[in-house]
Amino acid sequence: MTNGNRYDVTTWPVGDPVEDIGEVINSIIADITSRQVGADDRDGGKPGAVIYVPPGDYRLRTQVVIDISFLRIEGSGHGFTSSSIRFNVPEEEWPDLHELWPGGSRILVDMPLTEGSTEVEGAAFYVERAGSPRISSVEFSNFCIDGLHFRPDGSRKHPENTYVNGKTGIYVASANDSFRINGMGFVYLEHALTVCQADALSIHDNFIAESGSCIELRGWGQASKITDNLIGAGPDGYSIYAENHGGLLVTANNVFPRGASSVHLEGVSRSSVSSNRLHSFYPGMVVLAGDSSENLIGANHLLRDEEPWTPFLGVGNGADDLYGVIRVEGSFNSVIGNHISEVVDTHSIRPAGVTPVMVRLASGSGNYVASNHVVARGVHAASGGSAFEAQVGALLTTASAEALAVTAVVVDSESTGNTVLDTGTDDQITADRNANAIRPAPAPGA
Amino acid sequence: MTNGNRYDVTTWPVGDPVEDIGEVINSIIADITSRQVGADDRDGGKPGAVIYVPPGDYRLRTQVVIDISFLRIEGSGHGFTSSSIRFNVPEEEWPDLHELWPGGSRILVDMPLTEGSTEVEGAAFYVERAGSPRISSVEFSNFCIDGLHFRPDGSRKHPENTYVNGKTGIYVASANDSFRINGMGFVYLEHALTVCQADALSIHDNFIAESGSCIELRGWGQASKITDNLIGAGPDGYSIYAENHGGLLVTANNVFPRGASSVHLEGVSRSSVSSNRLHSFYPGMVVLAGDSSENLIGANHLLRDEEPWTPFLGVGNGADDLYGVIRVEGSFNSVIGNHISEVVDTHSIRPAGVTPVMVRLASGSGNYVASNHVVARGVHAASGGSAFEAQVGALLTTASAEALAVTAVVVDSESTGNTVLDTGTDDQITADRNANAIRPAPAPGA
Amino acid sequence: MTNGNRYDVTTWPVGDPVEDIGEVINSIIADITSRQVGADDRDGGKPGAVIYVPPGDYRLRTQVVIDISFLRIEGSGHGFTSSSIRFNVPEEEWPDLHELWPGGSRILVDMPLTEGSTEVEGAAFYVERAGSPRISSVEFSNFCIDGLHFRPDGSRKHPENTYVNGKTGIYVASANDSFRINGMGFVYLEHALTVCQADALSIHDNFIAESGSCIELRGWGQASKITDNLIGAGPDGYSIYAENHGGLLVTANNVFPRGASSVHLEGVSRSSVSSNRLHSFYPGMVVLAGDSSENLIGANHLLRDEEPWTPFLGVGNGADDLYGVIRVEGSFNSVIGNHISEVVDTHSIRPAGVTPVMVRLASGSGNYVASNHVVARGVHAASGGSAFEAQVGALLTTASAEALAVTAVVVDSESTGNTVLDTGTDDQITADRNANAIRPAPAPGA
């Protein structure tokens, strides 16, 4: 059973990987399963296999269903390129484009879906297995899952900007252990990667962007890590979402716009969001909701600024500027040592004329907010140009900036017993000084 | 000497990798060495080789001895699954289990060992070479080393829970440079990975768990990194241990129980433990001992809570609750911006009735402790169920929690000249205010 | 176009990879390009290819020119070994050395260069493509680029210690997207890796050392990450340099000497340098210049100590001890939660007798410096021995150390409106208390 455990989709006798790699991989999985019968005796197990996807374009018309442990699917190229920018190029310029599509070991998700298809039906890779032990050590490595197109839903002028197509890259439905998602590219999927009931999951060094939502950890889970990824969701979705997780580590990620939030934790406890670089065009970048408690938000860089790109001008996430760039609905959390930059056009602030809020403790108690640096600057929105240039231009725009008044910390009356230290000056903190411990940073020259 | 430098254990003519992959790999190394004779002339070197281990089960009966640089051993699957949970499943349920064993590119360590065998004799992979230059750039990547079974030693009711079997995954005995351990799985080894005299070592993105000790850096060393791993040792061992190292970086790791400690530094200087998520069932999670000095413990999340799993109830690491969740025996260290949660059953506190200590400066001087958030909650231990569910349940248990009195910082009289800022309120700090600089956090409502 | 997209340099019919791998790879790229004609129709793209470089020595006499997206060049060994130590071994000892050269999948850069050759001419891998879209997803993975020798330029006694040879490992000249440099080794190059106009670049888990400069991000760029690398430049070059970047994340790196700086940001905004371990023999370790603004320097460990190795004794970077270990020329930056150790021989301080400066705010305004721990010790320089032993010895030397007076923070009169909290005691801070907000750390025993 040795050398036979390495498969190549292009040499497998069943199916045509170019026409339907799903059929090919399912056939390979059936072969692995059939060959594992009778194993699992004295110390000898069911070691699984690796399925190799060389660089190339492979249409997936049949959902891949994974129900065995120790399966690794690997390619030789994450193949990300910006389809979003490409689709927004005027069509008459297309003949001059070098490439029209992502590449690498690229799987074109092309299943027959309807508008009523469920997220599970729309999954290119679907992992499910009941019983014990939990399915373990499935690995996805270094290939590209491309949803190809979004479809019109009325939300955007250009149909390719809706982030809706019913397609999911990978959906893990069953309780699972020690999965790995490494070096992958995800693009133009409504949901890139959804994992339910994860234990010791590692999502590391991927490029997950131009997808409705990027990473969603659902149900419940523990002891997982989301590290060192480049991530950016659509304006209505999640870049990083987790619910009912304990012991989750989110670190070393560069999360760029859009994303309705950068990191949204729902009912998450004793987890850590540290040393990330987070960037959003909307309020509500880091949201601790659903009584999320005892989490650390530490040593992150947060930038909330303005949408610079024409196709998405005027798009928001529904949160206004009082919502909080960091919003805490929960108890005993720590917000320590972060840098928060707010760089906005004063005319775009909603409700008009309010003072934007950087950290909002909305409910719960016992939170600790210390040593965060709040910077706020008012600018005039960047003047356009190509997407890349506009973005870099906006990121570097400081010369024309002027001071902007913001509230560093708001502690709502629903939240008590919090400690706020050295985060904003006295006039930048709105809180009941009797119900909370507040020590403002001294004001220069005061 | 080009294409000839890629080997596959399943196609090598000497030995049978299924019966003894050790013999096969040693034979390959001998071949590499024999072919390198005469090289190393004008700019032409001894480039080493890669040995590929496809997914499969490979018994190792002969120790692999590595004495050449630039050797890479790589598989296609880290293959971790929880053997600990499986062994604690009642045997009558085994026929219903999907798999009994770890998988991937799995090496079954099955050498003839006795109880008197040394750690070195029990090493599956043993690296040693004297002389100059130091052996360099040996790489282990993406395969599984499985110690199979622990043996009874009287310490646990179930023999598979002892974490004792005399087996070591990888043991590097000689001074070495630029080694890499990446994407590996280690399971059921008494010592998973032991490296002596390391320079510029990288231990990155591995799954090292259910082993007596996980990572041990011994002798002395410098400029190494332990990053982005999932780690969890047995109750008597080390998850991460280093001695006499300078410039070590420990970051982005998710270290879960059990482990007598999460990170133990012995005589370590000028090193950094930052942005990790650490979880333990015992006091003494981060220990700076042996006059460890000038280290940074920053932006970590620490959780010390209760063992929720029946087979290990009542097991401890010998330290009582006065020992310190973070313990410093050394000088000029920094403990900045960490979140420390203590969530315990008040009846389990030892000595009974004491107030648990979060940070203890036991000896040395000039340490700096600032902006750490201490959270303490008393709970009733989780009510059991399956291991995974019990663990997640315990991690998410907050509803039933109540306030627990703890000492945020103790500065022993043996330690002087320390600075403690904003870590605990005045009544949570035990220190000689004349011999140290203490500024408590203000108390809410005070 | 499926299986045909995997190439091996050792089986390609054109050229001899041992004699000139550059010619071979260029021929392969031409083949890929010729086969992509006619693609790029309905959803079908130009997926690129992977070029495999097995372990071995490959001379590169012809520059590789990359002008297609989705190309991955991968080897099976980063092959780093210290050529610097080897070259400084007396030549009569060479016959006893195990290896003379780096290894792994090793490319020997051996192009015909003159002293007048430009950096671009000296690039082993040169990436350039104009037009739209930007070239995307080129990946370099797990091989070694070895510049072989430095040449005498009068700056050092030993010609191999000059860090000058006109060679560049990889030079990316055009605007680019989603490139990856992973698992590589770079050694003995004047410039290891230079990338202009990068978007969403990932430089991850590489070993880049003994090169004049290591990582240089030039022109402008955004949303990139430099993570989890081992890095160390020559005394005149950059370990990590970026200019006009926004949203750059530099985290989890272990940056060792020498390097004129560890991290130099020039005109960089809204970026983050966090959870790194940085070590240098000179002042000016982290430099924010050119009005770099709104950046976070957080949770890093910095060590500035003495050169312990004979061949480089007396070498400096031109900055004196008043320059600042961290130097800020810009506005609204954050320096939070760092540990800074200064361990020097008092006789080596320049200008003689001055009090060394740890953090210097030289210009700009609105910077925030909080919760940093400054440790300063005077030692006698290590007594030599082999390079490795001398280095470790120096790193661990604390016994003979004594207190050294330093200035924790200097705020120059050109810089105003800054906030300095808990970083140094009152007598360690030089600043206009009226123009800035200063709250010193309390002094122990005060």
Image: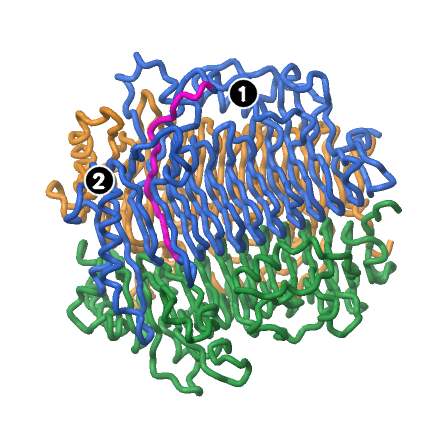
Chain colours: A green, B orange, C blue
Q: Where, by quadrant of the figure, is residue C361 drawn?
A: top right
For the residues beneath circles 2 and 1, the answer to whether they share a chain is: no
* Residue A298 in the image, given as x and y percentages of width and height: 64, 52
- Is disc 1 placed on a helix, strand or loop? loop
Circle 2 crowding by C-alpha within 10 Å: few under 14, some 14–19, many from 20: many
Q: Is residue B185 visible?
A: no
Residue at left offset 26%, top offset 34%: B47
Whether residue C389 is in magenta: the answer is: no
Give the left or right position of residue C265, taking residue C190 as reference.
right
Identify the image quadrant of the N terminus of chain C: bottom left
Circle 1 chain: C
Circle 1 crowding by C-alpha within 10 Å: few under 14, some 14–19, many from 20: some
Specify the amino acid type for callout 2: Gly
Specify the amino acid type for callout 1: Val
Q: Looking at this view, is B403 or C371 the one in front?
A: C371
- Is disc 2 placed on a helix, strand or loop? helix
Residue at which label 1 appears? C315
Residue at which label 2 appears? B22
Q: Looking at this view, is A181 or B310 the one in front?
A: A181
- Provide the major secondary structure of the magenta segment: loop
Give the left or right position of residue B291, taking residue A43 as reference.
right
